[in-house]
Amino acid sequence: MKPFRRLTWDAGELSSALKIDLSSVQEYFTDGRRVSFIIERRLKAELGFLLAPSEGAAFDLVDGQGDKWEARNITSSGVYFCPSYMVGSGRSFDEPGFLRKLKHIKGYILTDIEEFPNVPCWMIPKEAVEEWYETGRLGAGTKISREKALNLIEMLAL
């Protein structure tokens, strides 16, 4: 599957506007925790979607048909598909919660932030993620490496 869009930035302009050096811009925009809010708002603006009503919602964006989408960044350490409340120190994967999330969303918008400042984006239907999970292609807790994520996305085109 080819990216449906690329989000591009001018790192030099960001450096100047934010008054930080280029290496700090690169570091910030490739850290999924930090850049997620910016990516969500950029997708909202470019796609004409709405933001979720709160940061605690089980989705990030709503399209023109009212379908809900989860935005996730593919980082150097990979990407996960389970709800955010299951990720981090002291938290654990809960299969019923993951499956419940899938029932309420249309899919995932994945962005490969490792390619900053030219970030490819893919819209992955939840059915693909369900199939990956059912066939054991998603790792423990639904986390997979960047390489595996990109390979699975590429295979969707076949």
Image: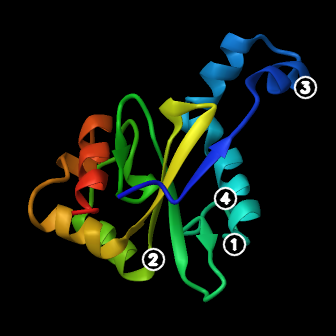
Write the residue at 19% across / 52% down.
Answer: 138
Q: Please, what is the three-letter code of the amino acid marked with disc 4?
A: Leu
Pick whichever of labels 4 and 3 is earlier in the sequence: 3
Amino acid tagged 3: Ala
| Residue located beneath label 2 in the image | 105
Instruction: Choose top left, top right, bottom left or bottom right for residue 89.
Output: top left
| Alpha-carbon span between mark 3 and mark 2 | 36 Å
Q: Is residue 153 above or below residue 53?
A: above
Looking at the rendered structure, the kind of residue marked 1 is Phe
- From the image, which quarter does the C terminus lie in? bottom left
Mark number for residue 43? 4
Q: Who comes first in sequence, dot 4 or dot 1?
A: 4
1 and 2 marks in contact (CB < 8 Å) = no
Q: Are the residues tagged 4 and 3 within 8 Å (C-beta)?
A: no
Secondary structure, mark 2, is: loop
Q: Which mark is on residue 49? A: 1
Q: Residues within 10 Å of mark 1 (few under 14, many from 20)?
A: many
Disc 2 residue type (three-letter): Ile
First reached walking from the N terminus: tag 4 or tag 2: 4
Residue with the mark numbered 3 = 17
